Protein backbone atom coordinates (compact mmCIF):
# COMPACT_ATOMS: atom_id res chain seq x y z
CA UNK A 1 0.00 0.00 0.00
CA UNK A 2 1.32 3.46 -0.85
CA UNK A 3 2.92 5.16 2.17
CA UNK A 4 1.01 8.40 1.64
CA UNK A 5 -2.34 6.58 1.49
CA UNK A 6 -1.31 4.54 4.56
CA UNK A 7 -0.61 7.77 6.46
CA UNK A 8 -3.86 9.32 5.25
CA UNK A 9 -5.89 6.43 6.69
CA UNK A 10 -4.23 6.95 10.07
CA UNK A 11 -4.81 10.70 9.78
CA UNK A 12 -8.55 10.12 9.21
CA UNK A 13 -8.69 7.81 12.25
CA UNK A 14 -6.86 10.47 14.29
CA UNK A 15 -9.35 13.16 13.28
CA UNK A 16 -12.43 11.04 14.07
CA UNK A 17 -10.98 9.87 17.41
CA UNK A 18 -10.03 13.46 18.26
CA UNK A 19 -13.60 14.62 17.59
CA UNK A 20 -15.00 11.84 19.79
CA UNK A 21 -12.56 12.79 22.56
CA UNK A 22 -13.55 16.46 22.28
CA UNK A 23 -17.26 15.70 22.65
CA UNK A 24 -16.65 13.22 25.46
CA UNK A 25 -14.66 15.84 27.38
CA UNK A 26 -17.39 18.43 26.72
CA UNK A 27 -19.98 16.18 28.33
CA UNK A 28 -21.37 17.64 31.54
CA UNK A 29 -21.54 14.24 33.25
CA UNK A 30 -18.75 12.87 35.43
CA UNK A 31 -19.47 9.15 35.64
CA UNK A 32 -16.51 6.80 35.96
CA UNK A 33 -17.53 4.92 32.80
CA UNK A 34 -17.38 8.13 30.77
CA UNK A 35 -14.03 9.02 32.33
CA UNK A 36 -12.70 5.60 31.24
CA UNK A 37 -14.01 6.17 27.71
CA UNK A 38 -12.31 9.57 27.61
CA UNK A 39 -8.99 8.02 28.64
CA UNK A 40 -9.45 5.21 26.14
CA UNK A 41 -9.99 7.70 23.32
CA UNK A 42 -6.96 9.74 24.43
CA UNK A 43 -4.76 6.60 24.46
CA UNK A 44 -5.68 5.56 20.95
CA UNK A 45 -5.46 9.11 19.64
CA UNK A 46 -1.82 9.10 20.73
CA UNK A 47 -1.45 5.55 19.38
CA UNK A 48 -2.74 6.52 15.92
CA UNK A 49 -0.63 9.68 15.96
CA UNK A 50 2.53 7.71 16.79
CA UNK A 51 2.04 5.34 13.87
CA UNK A 52 1.10 8.22 11.58
CA UNK A 53 4.30 10.09 12.47
CA UNK A 54 6.35 6.89 12.11
CA UNK A 55 5.00 6.52 8.58
CA UNK A 56 5.59 10.20 7.86
CA UNK A 57 9.23 10.20 8.98
CA UNK A 58 10.20 6.70 7.93
CA UNK A 59 8.45 6.31 4.59
CA UNK A 60 7.87 9.78 3.22
CA UNK A 61 10.64 12.02 4.53
CA UNK A 62 14.27 11.22 3.91
CA UNK A 63 15.95 12.41 7.13
CA UNK A 64 19.37 11.44 8.45
CA UNK A 65 18.04 10.81 11.95
CA UNK A 66 14.89 8.97 10.74
CA UNK A 67 16.09 5.77 12.47
CA UNK A 68 16.09 7.31 15.97
CA UNK A 69 12.77 9.07 15.40
CA UNK A 70 11.23 5.86 14.05
CA UNK A 71 12.23 3.93 17.18
CA UNK A 72 10.73 6.63 19.40
CA UNK A 73 7.40 6.68 17.56
CA UNK A 74 7.10 2.88 17.33
CA UNK A 75 7.94 2.51 21.03
CA UNK A 76 5.26 5.08 21.83
CA UNK A 77 2.88 3.16 19.56
CA UNK A 78 3.41 -0.10 21.51
CA UNK A 79 3.19 1.55 24.93
CA UNK A 80 -0.06 3.37 24.11
CA UNK A 81 -1.47 0.15 22.62
CA UNK A 82 -0.75 -1.64 25.90
CA UNK A 83 -2.20 1.16 28.04
CA UNK A 84 -5.19 1.42 25.70
CA UNK A 85 -6.02 -2.28 26.00
CA UNK A 86 -5.86 -2.23 29.80
CA UNK A 87 -7.84 1.03 29.90
CA UNK A 88 -10.51 -0.82 27.92
CA UNK A 89 -10.36 -3.58 30.58
CA UNK A 90 -11.09 -0.95 33.24
CA UNK A 91 -13.90 0.42 31.06
CA UNK A 92 -15.35 -3.10 30.77
CA UNK A 93 -15.14 -3.68 34.53
CA UNK A 94 -16.81 -0.34 35.19
CA UNK A 95 -19.66 -1.35 32.87
CA UNK A 96 -20.05 -4.62 34.77
CA UNK A 97 -19.90 -3.31 38.33
CA UNK A 98 -21.43 0.14 37.74
CA UNK A 99 -19.09 1.45 40.42
CA UNK A 100 -17.76 4.97 40.28
CA UNK A 101 -14.43 6.58 41.10
CA UNK A 102 -14.98 5.92 44.81
CA UNK A 103 -13.33 2.52 44.33
CA UNK A 104 -10.23 3.74 42.48
CA UNK A 105 -7.89 1.16 44.04
CA UNK A 106 -9.80 -1.78 42.59
CA UNK A 107 -9.64 -0.36 39.08
CA UNK A 108 -6.01 0.71 39.38
CA UNK A 109 -5.05 -2.88 40.17
CA UNK A 110 -6.24 -3.84 36.68
CA UNK A 111 -3.39 -1.73 35.27
CA UNK A 112 -0.70 -3.64 37.23
CA UNK A 113 -0.28 -6.44 34.64
CA UNK A 114 0.37 -3.74 32.00
CA UNK A 115 3.77 -3.10 33.60
CA UNK A 116 5.28 -6.28 32.09
CA UNK A 117 4.73 -5.48 28.36
CA UNK A 118 5.52 -1.78 28.94
CA UNK A 119 8.90 -2.71 30.43
CA UNK A 120 9.57 -5.01 27.47
CA UNK A 121 8.70 -2.19 25.07
CA UNK A 122 11.19 0.12 26.80
CA UNK A 123 13.89 -2.56 26.92
CA UNK A 124 13.43 -3.03 23.18
CA UNK A 125 15.35 0.20 22.62
CA UNK A 126 18.42 -1.88 23.56
CA UNK A 127 17.45 -5.48 22.82
CA UNK A 128 15.38 -5.02 19.61
CA UNK A 129 13.48 -8.20 20.55
CA UNK A 130 10.05 -6.58 20.23
CA UNK A 131 10.70 -4.89 16.90
CA UNK A 132 13.58 -3.73 14.75
CA UNK A 133 13.96 -0.88 12.28
CA UNK A 134 16.23 -2.22 9.55
CA UNK A 135 18.68 -0.28 7.42
CA UNK A 136 16.02 0.33 4.78
CA UNK A 137 13.70 1.83 7.38
CA UNK A 138 11.43 -1.23 7.48
CA UNK A 139 9.55 -2.30 10.59
CA UNK A 140 10.44 -5.88 11.56
CA UNK A 141 8.64 -7.62 14.44
CA UNK A 142 10.68 -9.67 16.91
CA UNK A 143 10.00 -12.66 19.14
CA UNK A 144 8.67 -10.51 22.00
CA UNK A 145 5.93 -9.20 19.70
CA UNK A 146 4.15 -12.57 19.72
CA UNK A 147 4.25 -12.60 23.53
CA UNK A 148 2.90 -9.03 23.69
CA UNK A 149 -0.06 -9.78 21.43
CA UNK A 150 -0.86 -13.04 23.24
CA UNK A 151 -0.67 -11.19 26.56
CA UNK A 152 -2.99 -8.37 25.43
CA UNK A 153 -5.41 -10.74 23.75
CA UNK A 154 -5.58 -12.96 26.85
CA UNK A 155 -6.47 -10.12 29.22
CA UNK A 156 -8.94 -8.50 26.82
CA UNK A 157 -10.72 -11.85 26.22
CA UNK A 158 -11.01 -12.33 29.99
CA UNK A 159 -12.91 -9.07 30.39
CA UNK A 160 -14.89 -9.65 27.17
CA UNK A 161 -16.17 -12.93 28.64
CA UNK A 162 -17.19 -11.04 31.81
CA UNK A 163 -19.10 -8.57 29.64
CA UNK A 164 -20.91 -11.36 27.81
CA UNK A 165 -21.83 -13.05 31.10
CA UNK A 166 -23.17 -9.71 32.31
CA UNK A 167 -25.30 -9.51 29.15
CA UNK A 168 -27.25 -12.54 30.34
CA UNK A 169 -27.99 -10.83 33.64
CA UNK A 170 -29.33 -7.63 32.07
CA UNK A 171 -33.02 -7.22 31.37
CA UNK A 172 -32.71 -3.88 29.54
CA UNK A 173 -32.18 -4.35 25.75
CA UNK A 174 -30.14 -1.16 25.26
CA UNK A 175 -27.69 -2.13 28.00
CA UNK A 176 -27.40 -5.67 26.67
CA UNK A 177 -26.56 -4.50 23.16
CA UNK A 178 -23.97 -2.01 24.45
CA UNK A 179 -22.25 -4.68 26.54
CA UNK A 180 -22.22 -7.06 23.58
CA UNK A 181 -20.66 -4.43 21.32
CA UNK A 182 -18.04 -3.57 23.95
CA UNK A 183 -17.15 -7.27 24.21
CA UNK A 184 -16.02 -7.32 20.56
CA UNK A 185 -12.90 -5.26 21.37
CA UNK A 186 -10.56 -8.32 21.53
CA UNK A 187 -11.37 -8.93 17.85
CA UNK A 188 -9.33 -5.80 17.09
CA UNK A 189 -6.32 -7.29 18.90
CA UNK A 190 -6.84 -10.63 17.15
CA UNK A 191 -7.06 -8.91 13.75
CA UNK A 192 -3.85 -7.00 14.45
CA UNK A 193 -2.05 -10.18 15.43
CA UNK A 194 -3.35 -12.15 12.45
CA UNK A 195 -2.44 -9.40 9.96
CA UNK A 196 1.05 -9.16 11.44
CA UNK A 197 1.88 -12.46 9.73
CA UNK A 198 0.97 -10.90 6.39
CA UNK A 199 3.03 -7.76 6.96
CA UNK A 200 1.71 -4.24 7.53
CA UNK A 201 0.52 -3.39 4.04
CA UNK A 202 -2.97 -2.33 5.13
CA UNK A 203 -3.87 -0.30 8.27
CA UNK A 204 -6.87 -2.50 9.11
CA UNK A 205 -6.16 -2.47 12.84
CA UNK A 206 -6.49 1.30 13.23
CA UNK A 207 -9.76 1.30 11.27
CA UNK A 208 -11.11 -1.59 13.38
CA UNK A 209 -10.17 0.14 16.65
CA UNK A 210 -11.58 3.46 15.46
CA UNK A 211 -14.92 1.82 14.55
CA UNK A 212 -14.96 0.10 17.96
CA UNK A 213 -14.33 3.44 19.70
CA UNK A 214 -17.09 5.07 17.66
CA UNK A 215 -19.55 2.33 18.68
CA UNK A 216 -18.56 2.69 22.35
CA UNK A 217 -19.04 6.46 22.10
CA UNK A 218 -22.49 6.10 20.51
CA UNK A 219 -23.46 3.49 23.10
CA UNK A 220 -22.38 5.81 25.90
CA UNK A 221 -24.40 8.66 24.38
CA UNK A 222 -27.48 6.42 24.26
CA UNK A 223 -26.92 5.49 27.91
CA UNK A 224 -26.59 9.16 28.84
CA UNK A 225 -29.96 9.83 27.24
CA UNK A 226 -31.63 6.96 29.10
CA UNK A 227 -29.97 7.35 32.53
CA UNK A 228 -31.05 9.66 35.35
CA UNK A 229 -28.01 11.85 36.03
CA UNK A 230 -28.39 12.03 39.81
CA UNK A 231 -29.17 8.43 40.74
CA UNK A 232 -27.55 6.65 37.76
CA UNK A 233 -30.57 4.43 37.17
CA UNK A 234 -32.88 4.47 34.13
CA UNK A 235 -35.01 7.55 33.66
CA UNK A 236 -38.76 7.80 33.06
CA UNK A 237 -38.50 7.99 29.28
CA UNK A 238 -36.46 4.78 29.11
CA UNK A 239 -38.83 3.11 31.58
CA UNK A 240 -41.86 3.47 29.32
CA UNK A 241 -39.95 2.11 26.34
CA UNK A 242 -38.69 -0.85 28.35
CA UNK A 243 -42.13 -1.66 29.74
CA UNK A 244 -43.64 -1.58 26.27
CA UNK A 245 -40.99 -4.16 25.25
CA UNK A 246 -41.20 -6.29 28.42
CA UNK A 247 -44.99 -6.57 28.52
CA UNK A 248 -44.85 -8.03 25.00
CA UNK A 249 -41.81 -10.26 25.64
CA UNK A 250 -41.84 -12.24 28.86
CA UNK A 251 -41.78 -15.92 29.86
CA UNK A 252 -42.94 -15.53 33.47
CA UNK A 253 -45.13 -13.20 35.49
CA UNK A 254 -44.16 -9.51 35.45
CA UNK A 255 -44.43 -7.43 38.61
CA UNK A 256 -44.06 -3.68 38.95
CA UNK A 257 -42.89 -2.26 42.28
CA UNK A 258 -43.60 1.44 42.84
CA UNK A 259 -41.76 2.95 45.80
CA UNK A 260 -40.94 6.28 47.32
CA UNK A 261 -38.86 7.56 50.21
CA UNK A 262 -40.63 7.99 53.52
CA UNK A 263 -40.50 11.54 54.93
CA UNK A 264 -38.53 12.82 51.92
CA UNK A 265 -40.06 16.30 52.23
CA UNK A 266 -39.02 16.38 55.89
CA UNK A 267 -35.45 15.44 54.92
CA UNK A 268 -35.36 18.33 52.43
CA UNK A 269 -36.91 20.81 54.88
CA UNK A 270 -34.69 19.79 57.81
CA UNK A 271 -31.33 19.09 56.17
CA UNK A 272 -31.56 20.92 52.85
CA UNK A 273 -31.90 19.85 49.24
CA UNK A 274 -28.26 18.75 48.95
CA UNK A 275 -28.87 16.16 51.66
CA UNK A 276 -32.14 15.31 49.92
CA UNK A 277 -30.15 14.52 46.77
CA UNK A 278 -27.80 12.36 48.87
CA UNK A 279 -30.82 10.47 50.18
CA UNK A 280 -31.95 9.74 46.61
CA UNK A 281 -28.46 8.59 45.62
CA UNK A 282 -28.22 6.30 48.65
CA UNK A 283 -31.69 4.95 47.97
CA UNK A 284 -30.72 4.07 44.39
CA UNK A 285 -27.53 2.37 45.65
CA UNK A 286 -29.56 0.30 48.09
CA UNK A 287 -32.02 -0.70 45.39
CA UNK A 288 -29.24 -1.68 42.97
CA UNK A 289 -27.46 -3.75 45.63
CA UNK A 290 -30.71 -5.54 46.49
CA UNK A 291 -31.40 -6.32 42.82
CA UNK A 292 -27.83 -7.42 42.08
CA UNK A 293 -28.34 -11.09 42.95
CA UNK A 294 -31.23 -11.70 40.55
CA UNK A 295 -30.79 -13.17 37.05
CA UNK A 296 -31.94 -11.50 34.95
CA UNK A 297 -31.48 -8.43 37.08
CA UNK A 298 -34.68 -6.47 37.75
CA UNK A 299 -35.08 -3.25 35.79
CA UNK A 300 -34.68 -0.12 37.94
CA UNK A 301 -35.82 3.40 37.07
CA UNK A 302 -36.39 6.73 38.74
CA UNK A 303 -39.97 7.67 37.95
CA UNK A 304 -39.75 11.21 39.30
CA UNK A 305 -38.94 13.08 42.49
CA UNK A 306 -38.41 10.46 45.21
CA UNK A 307 -40.30 7.75 43.32
CA UNK A 308 -38.53 4.66 41.97
CA UNK A 309 -39.87 1.74 39.95
CA UNK A 310 -38.63 -1.84 39.70
CA UNK A 311 -39.87 -4.22 37.00
CA UNK A 312 -39.15 -7.85 37.85
CA UNK A 313 -40.01 -10.97 35.87
CA UNK A 314 -40.28 -14.12 37.98
CA UNK A 315 -42.17 -17.41 38.25
CA UNK A 316 -42.21 -17.20 42.05
CA UNK A 317 -44.21 -14.32 43.62
CA UNK A 318 -42.14 -14.76 46.82
CA UNK A 319 -39.22 -13.19 44.93
CA UNK A 320 -41.05 -9.85 45.03
CA UNK A 321 -41.56 -10.07 48.78
CA UNK A 322 -37.94 -11.11 49.34
CA UNK A 323 -36.73 -8.23 47.15
CA UNK A 324 -38.85 -5.73 49.09
CA UNK A 325 -37.35 -6.94 52.37
CA UNK A 326 -33.84 -6.88 50.90
CA UNK A 327 -34.28 -3.25 49.80
CA UNK A 328 -35.29 -2.21 53.30
CA UNK A 329 -32.31 -4.08 54.77
CA UNK A 330 -29.91 -2.35 52.38
CA UNK A 331 -31.36 1.05 53.30
CA UNK A 332 -30.89 0.33 57.02
CA UNK A 333 -27.16 0.15 56.27
CA UNK A 334 -27.16 3.88 55.54
CA UNK A 335 -28.42 4.78 59.01
CA UNK A 336 -24.87 5.06 60.34
CA UNK A 337 -23.84 7.59 57.69
CA UNK A 338 -27.06 9.64 57.54
CA UNK A 339 -28.61 11.89 60.18
CA UNK A 340 -32.00 10.31 59.43
CA UNK A 341 -33.53 6.92 58.76
CA UNK A 342 -33.78 5.93 55.12
CA UNK A 343 -36.91 3.86 54.48
CA UNK A 344 -39.22 3.25 51.53
CA UNK A 345 -42.89 2.47 51.06
CA UNK A 346 -43.48 -0.08 48.30
CA UNK A 347 -46.62 -0.82 46.28
CA UNK A 348 -46.70 -3.91 44.04
CA UNK A 349 -48.88 -4.70 41.02
CA UNK A 350 -48.88 -7.86 38.89
CA UNK A 351 -49.22 -7.45 35.15
CA UNK A 352 -52.50 -8.74 33.75
CA UNK A 353 -52.82 -9.57 30.07
CA UNK A 354 -53.97 -6.57 28.08
CA UNK A 355 -52.77 -3.91 30.52
CA UNK A 356 -50.84 -0.96 29.16
CA UNK A 357 -47.64 0.23 30.88
CA UNK A 358 -49.43 3.29 32.26
CA UNK A 359 -52.29 1.17 33.63
CA UNK A 360 -49.82 -1.12 35.42
CA UNK A 361 -47.97 1.88 36.87
CA UNK A 362 -51.26 3.41 37.99
CA UNK A 363 -52.25 0.18 39.77
CA UNK A 364 -48.91 -0.02 41.62
CA UNK A 365 -49.14 3.68 42.48
CA UNK A 366 -52.62 3.11 43.97
CA UNK A 367 -51.24 0.25 46.08
CA UNK A 368 -48.43 2.54 47.26
CA UNK A 369 -50.92 5.29 48.11
CA UNK A 370 -53.05 2.86 50.14
CA UNK A 371 -49.99 1.62 52.06
CA UNK A 372 -48.87 5.17 52.91
CA UNK A 373 -52.42 6.13 53.90
CA UNK A 374 -52.66 3.12 56.20
CA UNK A 375 -49.28 3.95 57.80
CA UNK A 376 -50.33 7.54 58.43
CA UNK A 377 -53.56 6.33 60.03
CA UNK A 378 -51.67 3.95 62.30
CA UNK A 379 -49.20 6.70 63.20
CA UNK A 380 -52.03 9.03 64.21
CA UNK A 381 -53.64 6.32 66.35
CA UNK A 382 -50.34 5.66 68.12
CA UNK A 383 -49.81 9.38 68.62
CA UNK A 384 -53.34 9.79 70.02
CA UNK A 385 -52.89 6.81 72.35
CA UNK A 386 -49.59 8.20 73.59
CA UNK A 387 -51.11 11.64 74.27
CA UNK A 388 -54.01 10.02 76.12
CA UNK A 389 -51.60 8.06 78.30
CA UNK A 390 -49.60 11.18 79.17
CA UNK A 391 -52.78 13.02 80.20
Image: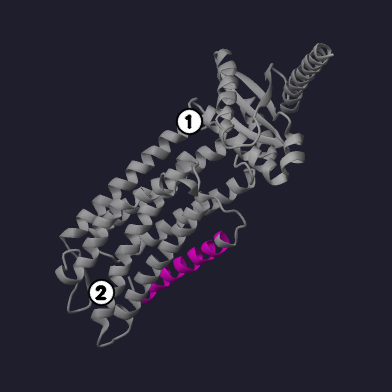
Could you tell whether 88 is left or right of 336 in the image? Answer: left
Q: Position of residue 200 (x, y in %)?
A: 28, 65
Q: Is residue 389 left or right of residue 280?
A: right
Which SS class for mark 2?
helix
Give yes or no for residue 21 being in the magenta stretch.
yes
- Residue 116's quadrant in the figure? bottom left
Looking at the rendering, the stretch of residues picked out in magenta corresponds to 3-24
Furthest-bottom residue in view? 64
Report the number of numbered marks: 2
Q: 13 and 312: which one is in front?
A: 312
Which mark sits nearer the N-terminus, 2 or 1?
2
Q: Is residue 120 above or below residue 385?
A: below
Tell me, yes or no, whether the highlighted magenta stretch contains residue 257. Answer: no
Q: Position of residue 105 (x, y in %)?
A: 40, 48
From the image, which quarter does the C terminus lie in? top right
Q: Main secondary structure of the magenta part?
A: helix
Residue at image location 55% in from the left, 59% down from the top: 24
Q: Tell me residue 57's x, y (percent).
A: 32, 80
Amino acid sequence: MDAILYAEVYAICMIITGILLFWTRRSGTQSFVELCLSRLLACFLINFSANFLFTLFDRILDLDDAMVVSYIFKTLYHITLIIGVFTWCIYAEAQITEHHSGEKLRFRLIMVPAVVPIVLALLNLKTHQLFLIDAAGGYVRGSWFQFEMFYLLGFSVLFAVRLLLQCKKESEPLTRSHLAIAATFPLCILASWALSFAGEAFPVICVAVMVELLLLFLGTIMQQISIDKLTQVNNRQNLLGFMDYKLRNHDHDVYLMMMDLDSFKQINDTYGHVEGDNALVNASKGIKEACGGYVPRPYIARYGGDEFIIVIETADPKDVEILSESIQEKLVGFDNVSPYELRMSIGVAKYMEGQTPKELIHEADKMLYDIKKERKSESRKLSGAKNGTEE
